[in-house]
Image: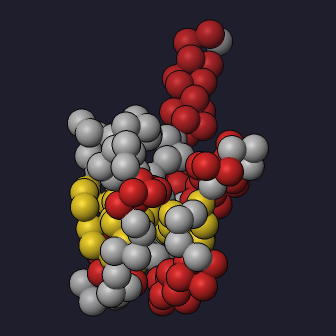
Amino acid sequence: MRRSVLPIAAILLTAACSSPKAATTVNADSSAGKPLTASTAFSKLSVKSATVTGTVTAANDPNHLLGRPNQYTSKVTFTDSRIKAADVSGTEKGAVERGGAIEVFADPADAKARATYIRAVTKSMPALSEYDYVHGTVLVRVSHYLTPDQAAAYKKASDKLS
């Protein structure tokens, strides 16, 4: 009797550990039928004052989140020319304060959870606050050094990502 239970238990354990989210992609690059990446999301924003400054990889991710379970699958950072250099002196290249970041997730719930986490962490630290816009699997993070009207341009542009 024991021998027949072990294979069944192994099958059930394997099924329980598999993640259907990894294969789920809500946003897609309709031009190529490929999953949306942070780079393609940035190009769709077309905010004239923004310039990509870096593509985050597993090797250079300061948060060590890229590709981890329930975390972003791609990320780019950008600067915004409307932010004064004096305001961001001393911040590292790629810091959201310099302009922002775009993070893409496998599942919309993961993007929303990341935005909720960032808001909770920065709520008591105004110097780290930021504007966060979630559209499907995409989280657009924008520097608090931009005025609300300037940040609203990112919100409006990110509406194209849904």
Rendered view: 22 above or below 80: above
- Where residue 12 sits: x, y (%)? 59, 33
Q: Nearer the viewer, residue 133 or 72?
A: 133
Identify the residue at image location x=27%, y=73%: 51
In the depicted structure, whether residue 98 falls above or below residue 18: below
Q: Can residue 49 be seen by looking at this rendering?
A: yes
The colour scheme used to paint the residues is secondary structure
As displayed, is residue 22 above or below residue 148?
above
x, y percent for residue 10: 53, 25
Q: Residue furthest front?
A: 86
Q: Nearer the viewer, residue 93 or 58?
A: 93
Q: At which x and y percent is residue 1?
A: 65, 12
Residue 43 shown left or right of residue 72 in the figure: left
Residue 113 image point, x, y percent: 66, 53
Q: Residue furthest top?
A: 2
Task: Tell me what residue is drawn at x 40 percent, y 66 percent.
Answer: 84
Q: Residue at horizontal 33%, vertical 65%?
A: 78
Residue 157 or residue 134, whichever sits in front: 157
User: Taking 123 as reference, is 140 left or right?
Assistant: left
| Quarter residue 29 falls in | bottom left
The answer to whether residue 38 is visible is no
Q: How many marks?
A: 0
Instruction: Note whether 152 is above or below 21 in the view shown.
Output: below
Residue drawn 24% across the image and 84% down it: 32
**Looking at this view, is 60 or 131 the one in front?**
131
